[in-house]
Image (tube, coloured by chain):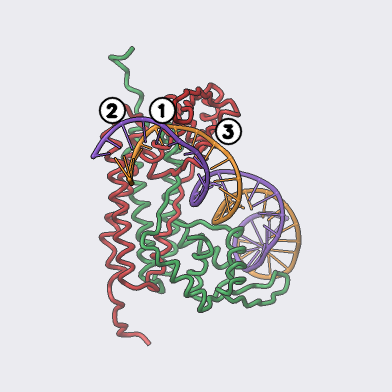
Chain colours: A green, B red, C orange, D purple
DNA sequence: AGCGCCATGTAAGTGGTTACATGATTGT
DNA sequence: ACAATCATGTAACCACTTACATGGCGCT
């Protein structure tokens, strides 16, 4: 699933501009799907070119025209097709874990720093989800509730694991009694 | 952190071929860092070009030469620099969650299918980690133990969450008694 | 007879990131 | 005064994916 398809999905919730969609990528979607303007704007152009969305241009003074996109019937059909995948992927790309694999090569102090920063990022995401829940819980679809809960559960599990197992990485290297 | 750097890290554990590294990407690294031959072989070439690894070519009959790479001092220095990032990222890209956001647009049956396939994939990864632990637990660094435990914890949390919350997506839309 | 393992690579394509470019309005 | 928000986009770049290309060996 690419950024185009996700944008299309977001538009099922009502017409919106690229700027609006970006905000959604930064809030409710932040914990599992990143996208910047550099992918969103071209995505919307392409959707428009293919007739999957329509674009209403609202002139504004001193700002670029606000372009409000709305999903078309073709767009809806396309989205539904995209949602048919019976086993959509869930990929993790973790520089954090890759780094931790090599913790034994790093100064103990630095390992601490990395662990602390991970916990801070957990807190950040937890806050994000809490904010978005406080804000939009009432008008959410069951899907969005499921997804927010999923994010919360994963972040909690991550934080707990890191706290409870950081000792694995911080204990002094035991004296190798029976070695060389 | 790119594939090059991770390959370099893997080589700190001893000399290996591209084929060997691929197996590691498919086992202990599978749950957080994907890489195919199409990235591994070019990565090793590039590392070799930059003097970060050396390559010993072992002729074989009927097969292409086996190329065994070994990290150099320059390579080690480079790796250590790369590991200095105080806040390495941990990114999730989930077509699964994106799909679930739009569950209300999908046939209930299909939502079930998707949920089931996710649980199956959890089981698959859990098995992978268990296998690799059984196989290599004894010679693992603390880092590798931490990372495997992390994967297990995340997979367990995911499976549990999906099982316990799938009802959010499967209940019939409740009759809206006090609406409209 | 056929499958899976061993073993390497390339080339074209994709999809996304980053940096750049512009600039008024609103709030502190 | 200064920062944040609103609002759009492009162009160069990068890293990775996918498909292709080759082919013997060992097991069942």
Contact between labelled residues 1 and 2, with CB atoms less than 8 Å apart: no
| Residue B1 in view in this figure | no
Q: Answer whether residue A139 is visible to the viewer in this image.
A: yes
Q: Identify the image quadrant of residue B81.
A: top right
Vertically, is B59 above or below A21?
above
Q: Chain of mark 3?
A: B
A37 or B65, nearer to the observer: B65
Give me the disc on residue B138: 2
| Co-location on one chain, circles 2 and 1 | no
Give the residue furthest to the bottom: B180
Image position, residue A12 (x, y; %): 48, 74
Res A37 → quadrant = bottom right
SS of the residue under disc 1: helix
Identify which residue is drawn at 43% across, 43% down: B33
Q: Dot 2 falls on which chain?
A: B
Q: Which mark is residue A104?
A: 1
Q: Is residue A34 left or right of residue C24?
A: left
Q: Above or below — where is B86 with respect to B51?
A: below
Which residue does the image show at 31% across and 49% down from the upper left? B155
């Amino acid at each position: 699933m690419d950024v185009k398809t996700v944008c299309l999905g977001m538009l099922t919730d009502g017409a919106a501009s690229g700027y609006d969609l970006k905000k959604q990528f930064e809030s409710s979607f932040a914990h599992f799907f990143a996208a910047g303007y550099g992918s969103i704007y071209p995505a919307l152009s392409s959707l428009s070119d293919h007739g999957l969305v329509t674009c209403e241009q609202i002139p504004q003074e001193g700002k670029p025209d606000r372009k409000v996109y709305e999903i078309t019937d073709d767009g809806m059909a396309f989205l539904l097709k995209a949602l048919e995948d019976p086993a959509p992927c869930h990929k993790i790309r973790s520089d954090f874990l890759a780094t931790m694999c090599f913790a034994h090569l790093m100064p103990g102090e630095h390992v601490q720093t990395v662990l602390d920063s991970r916990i801070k990022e957990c807190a950040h995401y937890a806050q994000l989800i809490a904010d978005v829940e406080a804000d939009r819980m009432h008008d959410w679809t069951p899907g969005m509730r499921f997804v927010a809960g999923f994010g919360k559960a994963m972040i909690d599990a991550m934080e707990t694991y890191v706290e409870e197992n950081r000792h694995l990485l911080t204990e002094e290297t035991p004296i190798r009694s029976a070695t060389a």
